[in-house]
Amino acid sequence: MIKRKKSVRSRVHAALTAKSAEAPRQRIGVMGGTFDPIHNGHLVAASEVADRFDLDFVLFVPTGEPWQKRGRKVSHSEDRYLMTVIATASNPQFSVSRVDIDRPGATYTVDTLRDLKVIYPNADLFFITGADALQKIMTWRDWEEMFDAATFVGVTRPGVHLRAEDLKGIDASRLHLIEIPAMAISSTDCRKRAEAGRPVWYLVPDGVVQYIAKRGLYQSAEGTVGSVGPASVNSTSEDTAPVDAASVDAKSDTDD
């Protein structure tokens, strides 16, 4: 009886293993970033990488506490998460993960990839990042493990000259570089424009423009939002507390 019981368990385990092996592997893009704010360059880059690498979908992962940005003010993680949800809502190939936001402590890419490998055990991950980040990637925590967990796709801005051969010590088969013209847009420039009261229309998605204005994000020292968003949207002191993600219908905040 005992032998038969073990045999049954063995057969069940073998069947499950075979079923998992037969299932087609997914190809998932992972775009991590502070997204403060997310802009059209991020969306164009994700769409282009998805097309070139035949990805099933792209997962946007806003950082919780970006360790590289300690020392500068970063918008609340829920604001950055909601802007990302709003920006990606109209594209069925895009999704947003809270894996980094919900993990306590500083956000490290290696932890992101470890968690995603558990969530998507039958998937090949393609981590999408900027070329400027790639130049410093060997200073990141456990960077060698990151390249074991995912293939890295570096998107370069026009005028940025970087070759895979320049990144010595990295397996060339795990690294690809592509140029994306729209990456000339930067979150830093968007924040500076918003702080100065200049418009960010067409640099970030329309729904994100409205969200920035409503929440009063990136206000100047005088506390004015300027022409960053619609004149009919006012920021009040009651809007300064973090927003509950569950209370926002992302699709209703987009113009698509």
Image (tube, grey):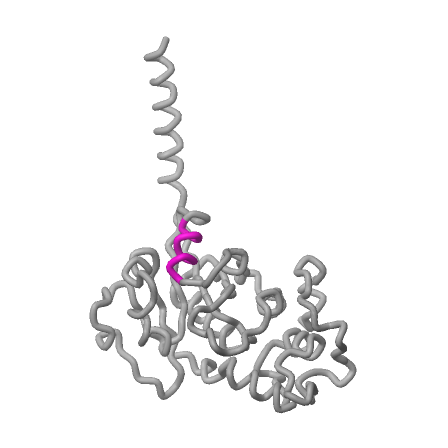
- Find residue 249 and report its image quarter: bottom right
Please state, as top left, top right, bottom left or bottom right, where the C terminus lies in the image. Answer: bottom right
Q: Where residue 148 appears, x then y in whole percent?
A: 29, 56
Q: Where residue 233 appears, x then y in whole percent?
A: 76, 80
Identity of the residue furthest to the right in this view: 232
Q: Where residue 62 appears, x then y in whole percent?
A: 52, 65
Residue 111 in magenta stretch: yes
Front residue of 73 and 225: 73
* Residue at (61, 87) in percent of width and height: 195
* Residue at (23, 77) in percent of width and height: 166
**73 to 251, vertically: above or below:** below
Q: Is residue 56 left or right of residue 203?
A: left
Front residue of 32 and 202: 32
Residue 88 in magenta stretch: no
Magenta-highlighted residues: 109-117
**200 to 177, vertically: above or below:** below
